[in-house]
Amino acid sequence: MNSNPLNGWQVDRQRINFVGHDLERPECIIAQPDGSLFTADARGGVMEISPNGQQRLLAPLNATQGAADFNQRYVQSAGASLPNGLALTEAGDFIICNWGLDRVEQLDRQGNLQVLCDQLDGKPLGKTNFPLLDRHGRLWFTVTTTQQPWTDSINSGVQDGYIAVMDEQGVRVAAEGFAGTNEIRFDDKEQWLYVVESNARRISRLRLRPDGSLGEREIFGPRELPGFPDGFAFDSFGNLWVTLIMSDLLIALTPDGDLLTLLDDGDPQATATLNAHYRARTLTPEVMQAARGSLAPWMASITFGGPDLRTVYLGSLMGTRIPCFRSPVAGQPLIHWR
């Protein structure tokens, strides 16, 4: 039996490099084999970063940009475009979950925008978070909560997050009752759909049935992680790399569900305060804002890229550039990675 390449391994901070400059809320990152990157951008679209470092904003001309202050952009997050999760279609267009406008969009390389979905059963979607395409062409997306502001859902303990799917039959709820639904990923055989439940600090997974519906549900790994999970990605060994936002930890869950700490960039005192308020259900935006690291403040996502899929990129909500480093194991290829 091969030993896990992550056992005993941690990120060498001296070997961390950075990509991009003056980025705005690069929450989600799509990497391509030639070294180009596409990141979500708070100016209403996607920032393209070429291998030579040149940047080009792909955004509709009429994108409504929100205020720059923390409360309006990160807490209220309503009425202005705020791209969050991204997916890449076979044609090269971007599927965007727009956190600020509570909808799912499609953006082409010329900046033309199409709203794919903004209602379900006649009701607003809620805080759309992350889109995912499967091998059958179905579009899955998550809604974190329907509460406004979304931060209220953490203290209340409400489990109103859900997963929706869009196919030739329309849009429907595929699963519901989640505590802060965030990123979702399939395993390499598309047998299980893994789900980040940020507010409950756990990873769940659901069996994908042959008819495309979701079946049995279970917790994967610890019942509670040491922070709020946000983004995740599989490597080729089967480890699930997970970012813990605000405490700014990068961890990995092994195929057996064991937890490995790969990078700790948090502020210990601010993290302790964050955790105490989480337990007491007294979290405030001020406490949350104070808890962050320096490499990728509010570390929000992880992406494997480069020609060998061994370069790791970290997305964040408050960073202006993207940290990257080499991994001892390659990532799992994504749909339409080309």
Image (cartoon, helix red, strand yellow):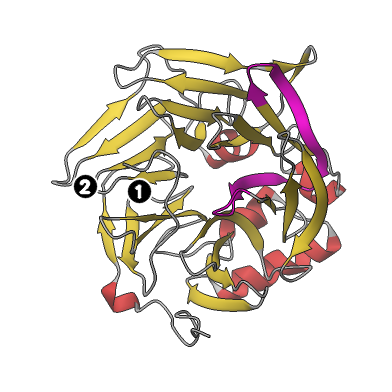
Q: Where is residue 112 in the image (x, y as percent from the top left)?
A: 37, 13
Q: Earlier in the sequence, mark 1 or mark 2?
A: 2
Amino acid type, mark 2: Asp
Q: Main secondary structure of the magenta part?
A: strand
Q: Position of residue 283 (x, y in %)?
A: 75, 55
Amino acid type, mark 1: Thr
Name which residue lies at 21% across and 47% down.
Answer: 34
Inspect this view and state whether residue 22 appears: yes
Name which residue lies at 58% across and 40% down.
Answer: 74
Callout 1: few (<14), some (14-19), or many (20+) C-alpha neighbours within 10 Å?
Answer: many
How many labels, in total? 2
Residue ranking furthest to the left: 52
Q: In which quarter of the image is residue 311?
A: bottom left
Q: Mark 1 points at which residue?
A: 320
As helix, strand or loop, the secondary structure at mark 1 comes to loop
As helix, strand or loop, the secondary structure at mark 2 comes to loop
Relative height, residue 35 to residue 145 (above, below): below
Instruction: Please give left or right for residue 103 compared with residue 50 in the image.
Output: right
Instruction: Please give left or right for residue 250 compared with residue 51 in the image.
Output: right
Q: Name the residue under label 2.
A: 34
Is 127 in front, or is 318?
127
Residue range (magenta): 166-190
Relative height, residue 92 to residue 287 (above, below): above
Relative height, residue 148 to residue 33 (above, below): above
Q: Position of residue 328 (x, y in %)?
A: 36, 75
Q: Quadrant of the C terminus?
A: top left
Is 5 in front, or is 325?
5
Name which residue lies at 66% across and 75% down.
Answer: 256
Q: Magenta includes 59?
A: no
Image marks 1 and 2: residues in contact by CB distance under 8 Å: no
